[in-house]
Amino acid sequence: MAAGGRAWAAAALLSPWRLQAPRRAYGCAAAPARGGAGRRALLGAAFALGGGAGLYLAARQRLREHSAAELPAGNLQLTLYQYKTCPFCSKVRAFLDYHGLPYEIVEVNPIMRKEIKFSTYRKVPILLANAGSPLQLNDSSVIISAIKTYLISRRNSLEEIVSFYPPMKTVTEQGKEVFEYGNKYWLMLDEKETKRVYPVNEVRVEEMKWRKWADDWLVHLISPNVYRTPREALASFDYIVREGKFGTVEGFFAKYLGAVAMFFVSKRLKKRHHLQDNVREDLYEAVNEWVKAVGKHRLFMGGNQPNLADLAVYGVLRVMEGLEAFDDMMVHTKIQPWYQRMEEVIQKAVVAA
């Protein structure tokens, strides 16, 4: 999206939108903007590739966009505020692409976050949706469940569907109060619709189980693996600086000091999530556990087509593409055939949209 388009989306469209601002336990949070420009660049870069929540880009980047204006009047109009390589944002994009839903992308700067200044909810993804009335949706799993429910059942307005996912205050292991969303892995369907989508209850239970697994476990393996060694940390930050918009000095600090900082952060994350000394083993075990759950007789967990669990796992894993951790995963696990099928089916949906 051009800079003018972003300004139009942020200023002209957003002011009348109904905002929902509760925070959540899982998301891609931006780094605080403190100190001078060099310090801001370092902090932004250091947290841009994941921190506790995953891998994301530290600067705006032009992405492939879908124009909501191209939709016929009355259809669902969507704008996604994201960090490109945040796994939660990647999950939402995989879902929207697979379902052929046009959407605009606004890449959020993780340092200043001016693009989401309209919202008191300060994490991404944020999805602005207009299905007759404007609405803000927060939390990747809520976004996916609510939009999927809306696509299947038009009995309720999107606003009413979102109300089925109420925010609830909870306390993390570190004693921090956050908001989580109730029912976020459920599709809010009536009995007839449920039978059509989930012929047997076990199918629904399985999908929900693995969607939650992707959020609660798989996503926490990303940062410790991409920052596993100083060399891998430097490669990750080389990617950030190469793809981002940094000045010469800012880029230098982001690449070298940021890599050092996140190498040590990854060690704390390893301890927090009780990972093995070689965090690759946790990644391999998790990925092979997923492949085993899909089984040998299904193309996807959803059968002949991906379900929401397939899209969630794929969305999380693909943020490592181009990094050593991803290549190692492809060599040392059985994920490659499933992953390639996911790439093909989503690409086919994008082309057809």
Image (cartoon, rainbow, N blue to C red):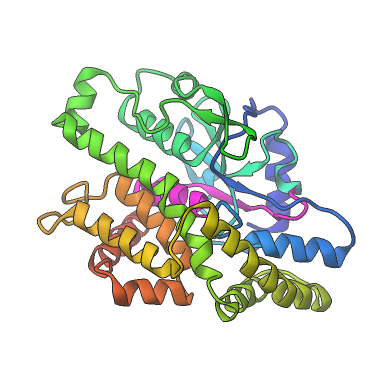
Q: Left or right? Give the position of 86 relative to 290.
A: right
Would residue 94 be counted in the magenta stretch? Answer: yes
Considering only vertical position in the picture, is 1 above or below 257? above
Closest to the observer, 256 or 142: 256
Q: Quarter-wise, where is residue 289 in the image? A: bottom left
Closest to the observer, 89 or 237: 237
Q: Residue at x 53, y 71 (%)?
A: 228
Q: Residue at x 78, y 65 (%)?
A: 41
Instruction: Point out residue 201 in the picture as x, y percentages from the top left corner.
Output: 18, 29
Q: Is residue 79 visible?
A: yes
Q: Residue furthest bottom?
A: 231
Q: Residue furthest right?
A: 36
Q: Left or right? Give the position of 261 relative to 183.
A: right
Closest to the observer, 234 or 342: 234
- The N terminus sits in image quarter: bottom right
Q: Quarter-wise, where is residue 244 in the image? A: bottom right
Considering only vertical position in the picture, is 238 above or below 7? below
Would residue 207 be counted in the magenta stretch? Answer: no
Q: Is residue 49 visible?
A: no
Instruction: Point out residue 58 in the picture as x, y percentages from the top left corner.
Output: 67, 62
Q: Residue at x 58, y 64 (%)?
A: 267
Write down the region rendered in magenta.
Answer: 86-113
